[in-house]
Image: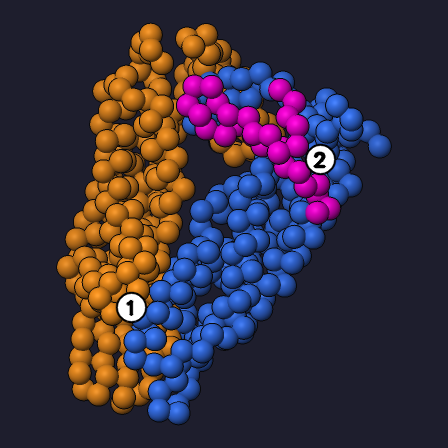
Amino acid sequence: MSALPRADELGLIGCHVCGQVCRAADTDGGDAALACPRCGSTLHRRKPAAYTRTWALLIAAFLMYIPANVLPIMRTASLGDIDDNTIISGVVELWVKGSPGLAVIVFCASIMVPMLKFLSLGTLLVTSRSGSNWARRQRAQLYRLVELIGYWSMLDVFVVALLTALVRFGFFSLVEPLPGVVFFGLTVVLTMFASMCFDPRLIWDGKEDSDD
Amino acid sequence: MDAPSPRCIDTTAPALLICEHCDTVHRRRPLAKGEVAECARCGAVLERCRGMRANALLALVLTALVVFVQATLWPIVTLGLNGQYVAATLWDVIHMMWLDHSQVVAVLAAATLFVFPLAKILTLGWLLAYARSGRRAPGFRPLMVALHHLGPWTMSEVFVLGALVSIVKAHLYFDVLPDPGIYAYGALMLLITVFAGVDLTRLWDETRDEDAGGAP
């Protein structure tokens, strides 16, 4: 399997945007000014400052994630009875009163997916930086999974928004969004940017040993 | 073999492919209909041969546009309490979030549920209308780049699941009546799933620029 050549070794660059195979021959100095001849996008051998940017966005997302979970995301008021819900208490309420199936889906989207993103991107950043040879193919798959499911975390934000718009019977019943939902929305957006800034090619950049 | 299966590669296609996930260089092989080329190193999809031609895709995009307009304009669900009824459309959702001090969420919802999906559908329709005859639409280059960057920022399918969860939650306290909007969203979700399997970068190879010396 070591016969698989990499674009970098052959002096080629693949365009992120249109897939065009470009020659990188005259760019030994830096690839700052190189543009794809077909679509005009800037070409990078690797995404610029991938580690720094991904770390920064991931940490920012995590900082937002704390108030997102601690603060309530939604207030339901009916006949003077005020009830503030956090993400977790919303899942519990669905489990107890509604349908456990949906509770599992919401739990996955709101709690498991963000945690999975923090853990996987963190792991990918650390192992890629050290050029680790460990489970490369699985790590590549993990990155693609994170990219694929990342945006489903917006689920809870949309639920709060829809319920707010629906439940407005004035005095009798009211649903209001609370600050937690803003923090949660920002968490999702920041983690999406973080996974975009990471360059999965870095996973494969260390020395490759026999088995893979 | 009886009938020759349609091939996805033509002589104008470049001979090499680079995996965007691990930078491995592959020699391109012709794919039969429905086949998928995977990277030998990391297992990522390199390219897929869609069974559909530009014509069929354009028809789907137009369907998506009709369904999208309906999903956006029609109310999604109606809630009832003591004979009082409240219905909400997507715009009510965005408007209420704006009024309720959650402008960030309102902007996010407007972008991911209205602006970006609409931009994606219109752009695709425009590009495909020309691609039917192998031509590049005016603005082909910037539009293809924009389409690439829109990537995961259209979230209509997440909203469908959100609507479902909201219905179940609201059902604990109110009468819930589904409105036509929710069915339109369901149909949109199916169409989006079909589009997800389409490899749009192929449009670069399948169309030719008229001013850049493409012989008639």
Residue A71 pos. (x, y %): 17, 63
**Quarter of the image where the C terminus of chain A is located:** top left
A176 w.r.t. A59: above or below? below
Q: Is residue A103 visible?
A: yes
Residue at point 23%, 84% (across, down): A78
Residue at point 33%, 11% (across, down): A211
- Magenta span covers which residues? B29-56
> Among all residues in the image, which is located at the extreme front?
B1
**Label 2 sits on residue:** B207
The amino acid pointed to by label 2 is: Thr
Total labels: the figure holds 2
Give yes or no for residue B47 being in the magenta stretch.
yes
> Among all residues in the image, which is located at the extreme bottom?
B83
**Label 1 sits on residue:** A98
- Chain the render paints orange: A
Residue A143 pos. (x, y %): 35, 34
- Mark 2 lies on a secondary structure that is loop
Give yes or no for residue A144 being in the magenta stretch.
no
Residue A186 pos. (x, y %): 29, 54
Q: Is residue A10 left or right of residue A199?
A: right
- Mark 1 lies on a secondary structure that is loop
Residue nearest the viewer, comparing B52 with A15: B52
**Quarter of the image where the N terminus of chain A is located:** top left
Which of labels 1 and 2 is toward the front? 1
